[in-house]
Image: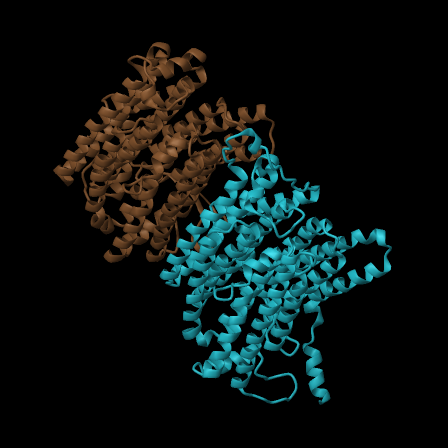
Chain colours: A brown, B cyan
Amino acid sequence: MNFSNASLLQLAIVTPLGAALVIALGLPKRFATKLAAAAFALPALIALWLWSQFPAEGAQNYQFLSSLDTGLASFGISLKLGLNGIALPMFHLAAIVGLAAGLYALRSSAERLKTYLVLLLVMHGGLLGVFASVDIFFFYFFHELALIPTFIMVGIWGGRDRNYAAMKMTIYLTVGAMLSLIGLIAIYVKSDASTFDLIELKRAIAVQGIGAATQNNIFGVLMFGFGILVSLWPLHTWAPLGYGAAPSSAAMLHAGVLKKFGLYGLIQIAVPLLPEGAAHWAWKLALLASLGNVLVIGFVTMAQRDLKQMLGYSSVMHMGYCFLGIAALSTIGTGGVVLLMVAHGLSVALLFLLATSIHHRTHTFDMSEMGGLAQKTPVLAAFFVAGTMASIGLPGFANFWGELTVFVALWNFSPWITAVAVAGVVISAIYGLRSAAWVFFGQPTEALQRVTAAHPPADLDWYERLPALILLAALLFFGFYPKAISQPVDQALTSTVARTAPVSFQR
Amino acid sequence: MSTELLKVVADSNQWWALAPEIMVACAALGLLVLEIFTPKEHHRFIPHVAVVVLAMVLVTVALNFDKTWGGEELFGSLIKLSASGQIARVFFLLSSLLVCFLATICLPRTRMPRVEFYHIVLVVTAALMLLAQSNHFVMFFVALETVTIGFYILVSYFRDNALTLEAGLKYLVLGALSSALMLFGIVLIYGAVGRVVIEGVVHTGFEYGIVADFLRHNPDNFLAVAGALLVLGGVAFKIGAFPFQIWIPDVYQGAPTPVTAFLAVSSKAAGFAVLLTLVLNVFSPLAYVVVPVLSVLAAATIIVGNLSALSQRNAKRLMGLSGVSHAGYLLIGVIAALSVPAAANAVWFYLFTYLLASMAVFGVMAHVAGADDTAQELDHYEKLARQRPLLGTVLAVGLGSLAGIPPLAGFMGKLLLFVAAFQAGLYWLLAVAIGGVVLSIYYYFGWIKAAWFETWSPSPATAQAPARSVAATTFVGRAVLTALALATVLLGFYQEPLTSWLMP
């Protein structure tokens, strides 16, 4: 049984990559879309099955383990796959958002649709691989596999300023990835374990720790490397620009899933392996995240008029909460971050999807030129308002639990920082509700009336509704049943972060 | 000379060990003979003979690859059979095979004689293979000069082009200078080792083993140190390391595209094969001076190469200057190899990935190049991906691998080098290298951008204006380019075929 589950995990990663290869080698278009749909759907089904197979009790270690030597065993690198309690929800996030983004892309009007699907499938395969990797080298490798298609998709199918945006994203994210790689290699060298296998590394470091000064240096490198990838202030400027220009499915996958790579790396690798380094940097990280990401970016977001730019900035802001949860260095905070990552990934993907749908109907992203769309497209309006509510963190949506647990953890860390973070919720309520009001309510502007007169806006099609519904359903499911995430996370955390705070995260 | 001595010499002359070189050299002569004795209308088949011979020798060497060859010295220790020499043979044969493939695309466009081109390529290949296995400074110098003189002719092969002639002259003058420096260094070492005894073939100050032995006992001999540095300077010219990279942009631009590829891949790799042997086996007692010098060279090479490549718009100059920075990364591997043995394998791994990626890019360049081989601007690549999806994809894969973007093979090469450098504790060099990699993303990506991302044009007239004619791809051309790109992708995921062979 265990063996077959491990191979299912492998299959989930191989399916999108294999489908991409087959389509790239020249499959006719009508088969290509069918194959792509199947390749997007299969990992989601496998993910659901694996969830049901994940043991409810005593699963402190990795499940579904498998290992494959790719020829670098002498360097301590092997393709080792498996899921622990933290990886499991993230793997599901990748599978769900990938399915939604893929379904949305299938019927998009993109030119050269086959190339688009190939890149999206590669990205999907990479994302699934990131969270299923136990080997920290392949963890990085799959991230890059998912990252490169993003640049190309922005460059070819992007909107305004796409060349500039693609270049800026490439350079920023390459610097971030390089720094992370140096940090990971430093762990590999300094641990003396001569392996990239996370399980072995943990064991080796538990026996003979890394010196405090070295830990500080390595954690600093990783924090800024991962920080660039997650858009830590002031290294965030690529994010709004890139998301503003990216085609919808790429933005969904990148903002929803790929961006969580850095946070996941901090939680899964940096904090457990370098506890003293984490303690050394915690306050600096908390200050950057609270004042920079939450407050400064919060105000910048309020000033945005472009819908996609606003979503890009708001996702930068929400990453601030995740950093704060990590900086709290407690099981509650870390657990909250995992919940928040899943919730934010679902909600931001939903909003990017709807933003493109809105653009199809208004032919503009400028919110000050919109208005009154709710009368013509009530379903679209309902989805958008629900997505906005989730993003603000209203109870009933998964985001609520994530933010709440992060705030609880922060209170023990520093009440002042908590105050700043809670102020951020007010800010996000302001810009969230205002954007919904601008787009859907009030009177349409003259410019919009001209556009709608020429192209009467239809409500959401089934191919737009289906992915939106999947995302919204997941948001509500985790909102009403957060235990689905908190239980596996709790099991994994009590074994990894236990030495810093032996408090259980579950109530 | 006594008969005893002759017998000893004859016993060590194991010609079978040099069979690959001999076959390639005979084939080179055979091409000329064929040209004389076959009717003119059959001359276009002669290049195929060169390709077939190279392919056959390549397969033979690869199949008879013997990992256990642990340094038997032949021909009065002129030649040393070793595993790394075998790797070098395979490398140079593969590279020359691909150069011949490029030549079949480029040469028909000009009115230049064809057979001689393949003849010289084969001669240079044989010399390159000997160079990598030489165990004696005289053998080393003779093989190196054979290579260099071959390149003098090849660089200025399209002699009706002014830029090509300029390139040929530059390469000749600077190459001669570097050879002179190297020869001076060899002589200094010979003088220092000091056994000016002419008693036949054995025990002279030219033999690597003797020199290494001498240096081990006298690591601070001034003459020997000066000689070693001069020799390394000559090698630095071959690999295009700072400050000997001056010739690169002009010569790379002026040389015919296949020759540029030959220079970029084989000539550079030959330099590193020699450098590894010299630094690890001969000059290792001089590490106290060699390591600082090479470290400064490596850092300066990476910085200069990347910075000067940033502003290039000519594809060949860009390949040349970015190749300079690759030499810098590889130099780090050579330095690391002194303390981490795995680094030498990492250098070879890197060179193989560099070969695959560079040849893929040069293959695309050969197709895109117009009548004037020296004028290959990045703007000519506009809309390439739309008109020729295959060429566009191969170009993107090749450039991505050169830039070291995962999951392509070039990334694995860089990773192995950087891990080795980390283990050797070369943190500053590593920081410089990482900075260089980030810079290189800019210009490699700029090229991919030119081919893939269409710039928005204000009017349809300018949008359709210069539709450049890109040469049609033959079936063989498509197959070779696809194979190169696929190999680059596969090696990024699965390194077993190369590592199991490189790292016994």
| Residue A72 visible in image | no
Query: In x, y percent, where is residue B209?
Result: 55, 78
| Position of the N terminus of chain A by quadrant | top left
Quarter of the figure with the C terminus of chain A: top left
| In the foreground, A346 or A107 | A107
Q: Residue furthest left?
A: A415
Q: Is residue A475 left or right of residue A124?
A: left
- The image shows residue A29, relative to residue A321, as above or below, that is above
Where is residue A178? Give x, y as percent. Answer: 39, 49
Kindly indicate the quadrant of the structure image that contains residue A362.
top left
Q: Residue at x 58, y 43 (%)?
A: B380
Q: Position of residue A160 (x, y in %)?
A: 42, 31
- Count of numbered marks: 0
Q: Is A190 on the left or on the right of B487, as rendered?
A: left
Along the line of sight, the residue nearer the viewer: B504 or A285? A285
Q: Which residue is found at the position 78% from the left and 55% from the top? A: B46
**Of residues A307 and B101, the one drawn nearer to the viewer in this rendering:** A307
Q: Position of residue B242 (x, y in %)?
A: 48, 64
From what the image shows, is residue B283 above or below residue A198? Answer: below
Quarter-of-image position of residue B155: bottom right
Q: Is residue A366 above or below residue B457?
A: above
User: At x 40% / y 23%, what residue is drawn?
Assistant: A356
In this rendering, the answer to whether A172 lies above or below A89 is: below
Residue B496 in sight in this render? yes
